[in-house]
Amino acid sequence: MSGGRVTGSAINRGRRLLLAGALALPALRTASAQGAREAPGDMGARANAGTIGVISGGVDGTYVRIAADLAAVLDDGDRLRVLPIIGRGSVQNLTDIMFLRGVDVGIVQSDVLAFVRSRRLVPGAGSVIQYIAKLYDEEVHVLAGAGIARVEDLAGKRVNVDVAGSGTAMTASLILEGMGIAATLVNDPQDVALERLKRGEIAALVYVTGKPARLFSGLSADSGLRFLPLPMTPALMETYLPAQLLRAQYPGLITGEEAVDTLAVGAVMAVYGWTPGTERHRKVAAFVDAFTTKFDRFLVPPRHPKWREVNLQAQVPGWVRFDPAQPAPAARPRRRY
């Protein structure tokens, strides 16, 4: 508009706005009609009918990235919604699966059931917690200083097992107890522990992580440090798998062609064993069906490379696999909702 006159360009802009408004009216009427036909309660029920909460790990860990991949591949926005949740360790994740609203699936270490049983932390967990799939293995690294030739030499010595409540702390305590080794466990972060080990302030550190561990990448043969073999015992066989650390993975710490025997603990996708026929069982069964049907999509970028280690047929010692066709155990603790 100039000098009180309406210009041609202004008229054209006005016509375009009117046309856009006219075209939008049918869509607005349709959305309004749909909203009027569906009550808020029905909308909420529909939104929650296919929602699965997956409790994972911390923001810097692998578990949360695995959970994010589950959402990216399986979430179709309609029949199945997958919500990744940041977790606080395997024991807390297991507890959340049992009792926390909105948590259906969790990623935990495979030895968490043995841990809570041995310490009676979560009564009834063994009868209701099952697994959907074993994911990948993480190796147990025991790095020792001078004067320590075998793991039995750690009896009475100071051994770092990462911060309290960590997966490493849980696994280290189970393994050392299973071997009858009474060490003094300390809880420094791993980078701090490595420096203390170099100075001789602790005898060894334990680190549960996938090989090769970046923490050990700068160590050389003249550091005086070495990996200790972890022998498999009948008691440990119920929970762990045999594994090896190779020279190709740690050229500065392993000399020659001889590998170092150790143990591996699996990452497990755990679930509550709902009674068949219930709504929660139906939701988990739908999640499992989508996971197995679309599994090939996890094996290509940009998904996490650890997916390529997953064998859907792999068994987890000490666990029961979730099977929608099988009845749930008769006696089970009730969830709080």
Image: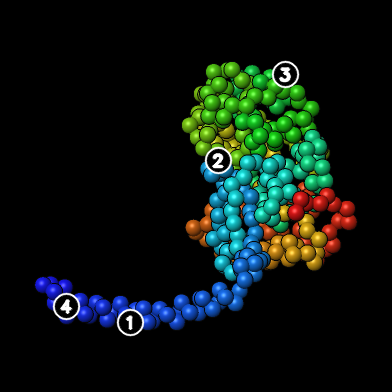
Q: Above or below — where is 53 with respect to 150?
A: below
Give the SS element for disc 4. loop
Mark 1 and mark 3 lie on one chain; the one further toward the N terminus is: 1
> Marks 3 and 2, how far apart in space?
29 Å
Nearer to the camera, 207 or 132: 132
Specify which label sits upstream in the sequence, 1 or 2: 1
* Front label number (3 vs 4): 4
Q: Position of residue 127 (x, y in %)?
A: 83, 50
Of the 4 image quadrants, the one containing the N terminus is: bottom left
In this view, the residue in front, 143 or 254, is 143
In the rendered image, the residue lying farthest to the left is 3
Q: Is residue 46 visible?
A: no
Quadrant of the image containing the C terminus: bottom right
- Mark 4 and mark 1 residues within 8 Å of each other at the beta carbon: no
Furthest-right residue in this view = 330
Nearer the N terminus, badge 4 or badge 2?
Answer: 4
What label does residue 19 carry, if any?
Answer: 1
Q: CA distance from mark 4 to mark 2?
A: 74 Å
Say which amino acid is labelled 4: Val
Numbered disc in front, either 4 or 1: 4
Upstream in the sequence, badge 3 or badge 2? 3
Residue ID at (57%, 75%):
36
Place residue 144 in its image quadrant.
top right
- In the shown orientation, is residue 299 left or right of residue 117? left
Q: What residue type is disc 2 on?
A: Pro
**Residue at horizontal 74 percent and vertical 65 percent from the top:** 279
Q: Nearer the viewer, residue 104 or 292?
A: 104
Q: Quadrant of residue 247?
A: top right
Q: Which residue is mark 3?
A: 156
Residue indicated by mark 2: 212
* Secondary structure beneath label 1: helix
